Image (tube, helix red, strand yellow):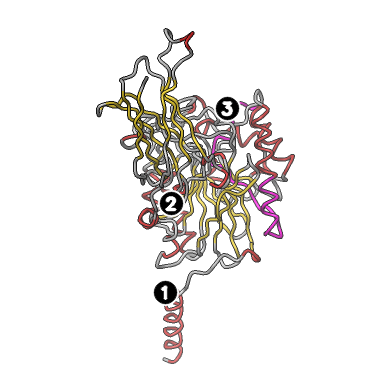
Amino acid sequence: MRKQLFYILAALAVISCERTVAPTAFDESKVVLSLGVVSDVHINTALPVTSAKWENALKLLQEKAAESDPDGLDGVLVAGDMIDYPNEDFIMEFKRVYESVLDPVKTPLVYTVGNHDVPDYRWNETMVTDAGYIAKALGDNYFLTDLDKEAFDGLECRHCAVGDYNILSVSPNGTSPVTYSPEALEWLDAKLSAITSKNPSRYVIVITHPMLYDTVYGSLLGEADGIWKSYLPGYWATRELPEILSKYPQVVAFGGHLHFPLNDPRSVWQGDFTALGCGSVRYMALEAGGYEDMAGQTTMKDKDEFSQGNLLQFDSNGNMRILRMDFYNKDVIGEPLLMSHPLKDKRHLEAYSFPPRQAANEAPSLTSLNASYVAPPASRKKDSPGIISVSFPAGSDDEFVHHYVVELSSGGEVLATKRILADFYKYPSPSMMKTSWEVAFALEEYPEKCVVSLTAYDSWDASSETLTKEVVVK
């Protein structure tokens, strides 16, 4: 009887402790694991800059990890699109660059299959066969941490262990919409169940190339109205994985595919699990917002002045820190993302939940607006009616202004609209952004009087008060 009572009391004590576990702060002096988490490397031997960016990213991850982790960088995770399109020379170049910086035996690399890694930029039912050349080219030394060879061979799903942490990699086999084989989904669910049951207070990392629907910045592209509706519906995010991941609050999931900048506060999301974007090592893209200076629907003309990724770290208490890395500017983007070790009551999922951050968000503000009519030179008066020149100081915000909308109207009718993307994506700190902006409207003819209006919007779509300026055309 005494022995039974002892076991009952011991069990109650364990349950009580589990319920009262408190979140703890990340301890930089006790980092036990550092992982680079990147995507969209897009190696192409015809474009040497792709190799240079990959090498630069690896070196900077290595250097930054060494600042707080005695063992330095412990591994690198690539959430797909290692190369530009299936080509053995490209994957061998990817490998060559990796081994010029890191030893895959000492610093393992774990990848998932991106759409650029298979033919026609599309996953299909032959995905496992289509991706087989990657493992063959990389060789056995790249798979020493794998714990489930059968799942890798049959599903292109990987279960790897780096340090004391589990990493699950899952690859789609359908493109529009992005889908996974039923066997892969069952495998992911079963693995997460087993891992989290064994250690419920430790994070589990999941990598996959597409975004997870309705989580981080960009995950609604092609899935919703407005700026998210028009571009390749069903191609960018998957609706299948969130249903499984939502059962496991220990999950921290990384996706690629979009190339969206990590500077945006929406690049980290918490709901029933944690999701993050990876930016892109190669170039930047963003929503189809109809901005000025676009090279395509979702790419800016300066898209190549960009290279980003993550440094993921865990301390000895299981707390997590994510440094968003700006490889192009060789700096860290903003403040570190800090999360307590997983807790039974899910308090570790509160810090980066969208609703409270939106509720606390402050709308941007503007100070002034200048606008005037500039007549053409006399020699060109017949060919050009001149321009309306607009200038304004950059808006201020508790984070940063995401974009501006400048309208030219007359008598209540809008004559022209310009959407100006702010340069937040180009710098690791908002303090480095442009301090003023200039816009010009050039119409074939002008009314006698025009009105210029200016509104600033932040990442949460909060808007400033609209400034207006009347312009008399002479």
Residue shown at 43% from the left, 46% from the top: 216
Q: Amino acid at mark 3?
A: Pro
Q: Is residue 182 left or right of residue 379?
A: left
Above or below residue 453? Residue 61 is below
Above or below residue 23? Residue 226 is above
Q: Amino acid at mark 2?
A: Trp
Residue shown at 45% from the left, 74% from the top: 18
Callout 3: 10 Å neighbours few (<14), some, many (20+)?
many
Q: Which residue is mark 3?
A: 86
Comparing labels 2 and 3, the label whose residue is closer to the camera: 2
The disc, 1 or 3, on the residue closer to the chain's N-terminal end is 1
Q: Is residue 100 left or right of residue 304?
A: right
- Of the 4 image quadrants, the one containing the N terminus is bottom left
Residues in magenta, as a range: 60-88
Q: Position of residue 27 (x, y in %)?
A: 60, 66
Q: Which residue is mark 2?
A: 269
Q: Which residue is mark 1?
A: 19
The residue closer to the viewer here, 133 or 35, is: 35
Q: Amino acid at mark 1?
A: Arg
Answer whether residue 180 is magenta in the image: no
Answer whether residue 80 is magenta in the image: yes
Tell me how far mark 1 sits from mark 3, CA to CA: 50 Å
The residue closer to the viewer here, 259 or 44, is: 259
Q: Quick one: which residue is furthest to the right in this view? A: 100
Res. 455 in view: yes
